[in-house]
Amino acid sequence: MTGDADVRRFYDGCRALSKSSWDENFTATRVNQFIREGFNLRPTSTNDQVANAVQVYPNPASEYINIKNVEDAIELKIIDMNGNEMIRLSTIEIDAPIHLQNLRPGAYFLEYQMEEGKVGVVKFIKF
């Protein structure tokens, strides 16, 4: 189980990357390090099997993301590190790629709700 200190370190790292200059700080090495160190948090779901099955690719992404294994999802949201809902999708829109042009570079959460009420979160980076 992830402790409060780990969650705080992850949050601080995401905020730092979100506020940093792209040219100076968003190198491939830095993004890979961030993924290795910060994205080792467990999915937030009442059912880890469901949470682990959902995949976001490519991750990191620049123009769009695809989502795999969300056939039973009734709603998807993309949330920034400040908790602001940036994009909300209904089941009709889930099969198509999700375009990210209106999002700034940084870390985001894809929150999904399944038909049976389970909720999960997948983290991804937009560069």
Image (spheres, grey):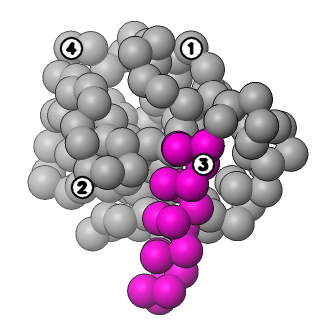
Q: Which residue is mark 4?
A: 92
Occupied quadrant, residue 87: top left
Find the distance from the CA under tag 3 to the CA under tag 1: 18 Å
Q: Which residue is mark 2?
A: 119
Contact, mark 2 vs mark 4 (Cβ under 8 Å)? no
SS category of the residue bearing label 3: helix
Q: Which residues are magenta?
A: 2-20
Looking at the rendered image, the disc whose residue lies closer to the viewer, 4 or 3, is 3
Q: Which residue is mark 1?
A: 63
* Residue 97 vs residue 54, the one in the foreground: 97
* Residue 116 vs residue 20, the one in the foreground: 20
Q: Is residue 74 above or below residue 82?
A: above
Relative side of 115 to 60, left or right = left
Task: Name which of mark 4 and mark 3 comes first in the sequence.
Answer: 3
Residue 15 in view in this figure: yes
Find the distance from the CA under tag 1 to the CA under tag 2: 26 Å
Mark 1 Cα shell of 10 Å, populated few (<14), some (14-19), many (≥20): some
Contact, mark 1 vs mark 4 (Cβ under 8 Å)? no
Q: Which residue is mark 3?
A: 17
SS category of the residue bearing label 2: strand
Task: Name which of mark 2 and mark 3 comes first in the sequence.
Answer: 3
